[in-house]
Image (cartoon, helix red, strand yellow):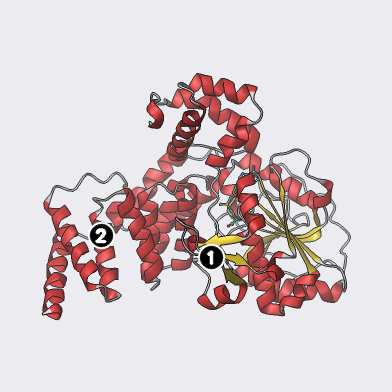
Amino acid sequence: MAGGNPPVSSDDLAPIKALIKSSSGLLFEEDKADLLRQSLASRMAQLRLGDMQAYLRQLEQDAEEMPHLLDLLTINETYFLREPEPLRLVAERLLPAHLSQYPGSPLRILCLGCSSGEEPYSLALAIAEAQGLAALAQVSIQGVDIDRPSLRRADEAIYGGQSFRALSAELLARYFQPLPAHSGQGPRRQLCAELRRPVHFQHLNLLDEDWPLALQGQDLVFFRNVSIYFDAATREAIQRRIGQILKPDGLLFLSSTETLSNNFGLLELVHEQGLFFFRNRPPKVPVAGSAVKPEAGPANNPATQDLAFGTRPSHGRLPRQSAPAAPSATADYEQALARVEQGDWPSALQLAQQLCQRAPEHSRHQRLLAVVLSQQEQFDAAEQAARTALAQDDLNPFHHFLLGRILRWQGRAGEALAQFRAVVFHRPDHWQAHYHLADLYRSQGQDEQAARSYRRVLQLLQQAPSAEAEPLMQALAAPPGRVIFLCQRHLQQLSEQEA
Ligand SMILES: C[S@@+](CC[C@H](N)C(=O)[O-])C[C@H]1O[C@@H](n2cnc3c(N)ncnc32)[C@H](O)[C@@H]1O
């Protein structure tokens, strides 16, 4: 452990985990224990505290301490135009429908867990693209988050590198002004004032009992890539509060991998235009096993109903998440791994989906789903699951490897390269990642780097490679004998080209 502190046992962590959960709702199961340990070590070193008991006392006695720890723990992964389909739905259909029903009344959108602002600003960008900059006068977008440093970055609206990973060069040039370079920082750009103007930020802990009254009356709520960090009881409590601040028939969007695990029978699940989202209206049929009885529905208000399309929705009901008393998640996970090993992909997919519905906060479930979906060539969904796993644990090199492979298959060489570089940064002996790097360099005409990487693979395979801890890696790794053959052949071709 850093800072010369003694190693922290799981027992030592238990009271701290309980404090974190009660103040923020964040769960730190085994798969995120490393992040917790590292954050604690770094905070204890800053405070010059030598043992965990002293830090626990600090947390209990000083109300200012928990926010410092949460700053280190919250996972703020986000980027512009992440999962863009719902953004397009808002810009192209929901906003025009709203304005034709309520001329002069701005569409109110709230982003819960907005991190450094990329999501609310992406909504503004999508609206500007679809309807022109003038349409932004008709919307009010608010972002809230528990993490104050992220909110400060959101207010500044200055971004670089990874935030732009899904943005085209054209959009980047249209809406972001380059800033003079600062020493030690890569190129940075500030979002233009027109897109910043309709967006505002505020601090909020989603676990607070009382949300500010001013948040009431939302037309749309985005709550994406946040619920994965909470257990089912916390997710359900938050959804009740969302129901209180949404207008009747207002809509709630989660990310595509989260929607099913947030189907508590409180709101109506709607499936339209290939998207799942919730409508603030009690479900027509009680959800099996739900303790929640549907109340009498709001009088169907012709002005607010079917905000989206003006026709009755075909609200497809999805299977309710499986009961927690079913065989343990670990047993199911082991079973899914066995299916992967046997190459029984349909069964593996079914098990992986069930695990992600039941416990989406476990990154091993998300990476399992990503592996299986990618084998089934469902690359968009696989990418989403891999990014979820990465957001949950970005120190796990396998998550970068998995995402790199998916991006490579999608032909996104530049983004794939970045992921494989991250793998070898964490694990310099990862021959599979070096092999992908070599192939990608070669495809981009960077022959010298390609040759260096092929040689590195051969070198690593000649030494006995270290044992692979990740069981899913076996499903993805090419046989070493074949890789040696391919490396030698490519090296020969590269040297012939050079001659
Ligand atoms: C992975 S980011 C998601 C950002 C954005 N919604 C997106 O989809 O790209 C998760 C955010 O949730 C925030 N968060 C976590 N727990 C929270 C809580 N209890 N209250 C408010 N925000 C919270 C984190 O600070 C982080 O910024």
Place of residue 374 in the rendered image (x, y in percent of width and height, measured from the top left):
39, 63
Residue under label 1: 180
Observer able to see residue 163: yes
Quadrant (top left/top right/bottom left/bottom right) for the N terminus? top left
Q: Nearer the viewer, residue 441 or 210?
A: 441
Place of residue 10 in the rendered image (x, y in percent of width and height, measured from the top left):
44, 27
Quadrant (top left/top right/bottom left/bottom right) for the C terminus? bottom left
Q: Is mark 1 within 8 Å of ligand 1?
A: no
Query: Number of numbered discs present?
Result: 2
Q: Give me the residue at 50% from left, 63% from top.
A: 181
Place of residue 137 in the rendered image (x, y in percent of width and height, measured from the top left):
79, 71
Circle 1 residues within 10 Å: few <14, some 14–19, many ≥20: few
Disc marking residue 434: 2
Comparing marks 1 and 2, which lies closer to the viewer? 1
**Image: 386 above or below 136:** above
Place of residue 226 in the rendered image (x, y in percent of width and height, measured from the top left):
60, 50
Q: Is residue 466 left or right of residue 382?
A: left
Q: Give me the residue at 68% from left, 78% from top.
A: 130
Q: Give me the residue at 44% from left, 40% from top.
A: 31
Circle 2 residues within 10 Å: few <14, some 14–19, many ≥20: many
Earlier sequence position, callout 1 versus callout 2: 1
Q: Secondary structure at mark 2?
A: helix
Q: Real-space Cα distance between discs 1 and 2?
A: 35 Å
**Image: 479 above or below 101:** above
Q: Give me the residue at 74% from left, 65% from top.
A: 197
Q: Nearer the viewer, residue 131 or 234?
A: 131
